[in-house]
Image: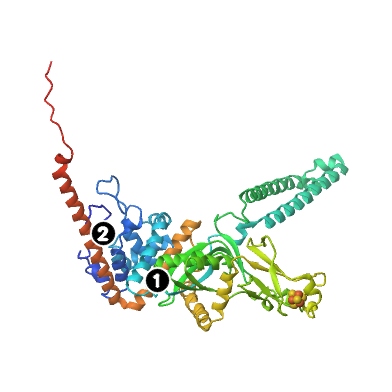
Amino acid sequence: MTNRTFKVGESREQPSLLPPRIEDYVGPDNPVRAIESFVCALDVAKLGFRHADRGAEAMGQPPYDPADLLKLYLYGYINQVRSSRRLEREACRNLELIWLLKNLRPGYRTIANFRKENWKALKAANCRFVLLARELGLVGGAVVAIDGSFFHGDASKASIFTRKRLAEQIAKLDQEIEAYGKSIEDNDAAEAKQPRKDRADGPDAGGGGDGGDIGAKVSALMAKRSRAQADLDRLEASGETQLSLTDPDARLLVKSGQGVAGYNVQAVVDDKHKLIVASEVVNDSSDVNQLHAMAKAATEALEAESLQVLADAGYYSSTELKACEDDGIVAYVPPPEGNGQVEKQGRFGLKNFSYDAAADAYRCPVGELLRPIEGRWQNTSGRTEIRYASRVAVCGKCQLRARCLSPKASRRTVSRWEHEDVLERHRARMQSADADTLMRRRSALVEHPFGTLKCRAGYRHFLLRGFNKVRGEWSLMALCYNFTRVLNILGFEGFAACMAKVFRSLSRALTAASSCIQLLLETFWTNMPVWLPIKRFAPSPVG
Ligand code: SF4
């Protein structure tokens, strides 16, 4: 196909003592052959893997083929081997890996660098697998569920500081420094009281012997305080709320009273076979701003014209719901109960007032209209609201005023978001008969991949640091989850047949592309003298 030069493994037909051929190391239906067939069907250069498009003329030591290293990682992540050093060891002793890599034995640095440097290509490979699942009809593309789960980062809770924590640390260090300072003063005073002879007898003779130690301790504390102050200044200058000293992008995430130093992984799961069709790694504890971004990513991955998206109450956000509706995404998110402060005071709440769209007014429990007041207001979450108010004269005579107005108010006001119609449609959708069934399906759908990855594979933490690398590692986890699932659904033979089909079409495409290029070149060279009239100049006379 091409003239690329890569390190070349031993032939699988090469005779050896035991077993006779590498080809005999694995059985004909060993799942490792599925990894081989999938990676062979990938166009690694198009996915952006480093060195994939290295030309034959390139100088120096040939690199490992990225396809081989991808096979190694896929095998490792499917079999719960993630560390580069363990992968290096397994490549030397594991017969399946020896077969897969044709006895290539990359060092741990090469293995580790591949995962770090190819995070974008790993994401692309994950997307390519989703596309493949779509082509195989394994994705429904009509209903998806979204959820987030915390994964530990390569950082401890102690390495992440908030402003409050840094300020407390500085205050504590100040106290300790002050206490040591006082102790030095006391020592000096005690020394001054002692007769000169006793002081000359050495450190054991009096309290002055500890002075040097205390001085060193105070210096260490001062240095620690300077570092804490520098961290606090850095945090304030960045505008961030947390500062992580080991992994700069990991954050202290808290949900339901439990804290994790790491990342929040968002996944969108298709309802047909529970495959992850879109995912992202963020470092925000809350899911509230993720609904639209994740739903949009799923729509693009599935190329769906309309998509039903199911999410839990943590994703409820009026602005996110509006963004979904604008993009033709039908979201099902349980609305929050609300704190019911007004109802708790025994007064009518918002649900006792009905909106009359034709009159653009609210109707109160006794049927009086609340009309819009001129102007717009921004609430604490930045939404623009319109206020509707009743008439003072009407409320003054109302029998129910004690149940409606606060003690100091003379009229009732109700606020309405400028796009409240979006929420009204959403509320009506959530009260429909379908909503209950869909919400029950939601948890069964989206808990499956997280449960499988965390409990079966034991992937509760990332080995890499920083958003890009962590996103690359997550792509590997998601790819392995999808890969194993598709393999289970299709069975080994079905999977191999599908891959062979994809590989044939890829080869056909490459052959077609290369003949096209050849034809173009031939046409160019044939017609060049016509297109570019080249004048022949008579040689100039010599001398
Ligand atoms: S107090 Fe005013 S707004 Fe409230 S129920 Fe009576 S008339 Fe309606």
The picture places residue 311, in percent across and down from the top left corner, at: 53, 73
For the image, the number of numbered tags is: 2
- Say if mark 1 contacts mark 2, CB within 8 Å: no
Q: Which residue is mark 2?
A: 9
Q: Quadrant of residue 103?
A: bottom left
Q: Which residue is mark 1?
A: 482
Ligand 1 lies in which image quarter? bottom right
User: In the image, is 84 to the left or to the right of 264?
Assistant: left
Report the front residue among 178 and 367: 367
| Pointer 1 or 2: first along the chain | 2
The picture places residue 140, in percent across and down from the top left corner, at: 39, 75
Q: How is the image coloured?
A: rainbow
Classed neighbour count for the residue bearing mark 2: other residues with Cα under 10 Å, few (<14), some (14–19), many (≥20) = some
The picture places residue 362, in percent across and down from the top left corner, at: 67, 73
Residue at 75% over, 50% down:
174
Going by the numbered disc 2, the residue's amino acid type is Gly
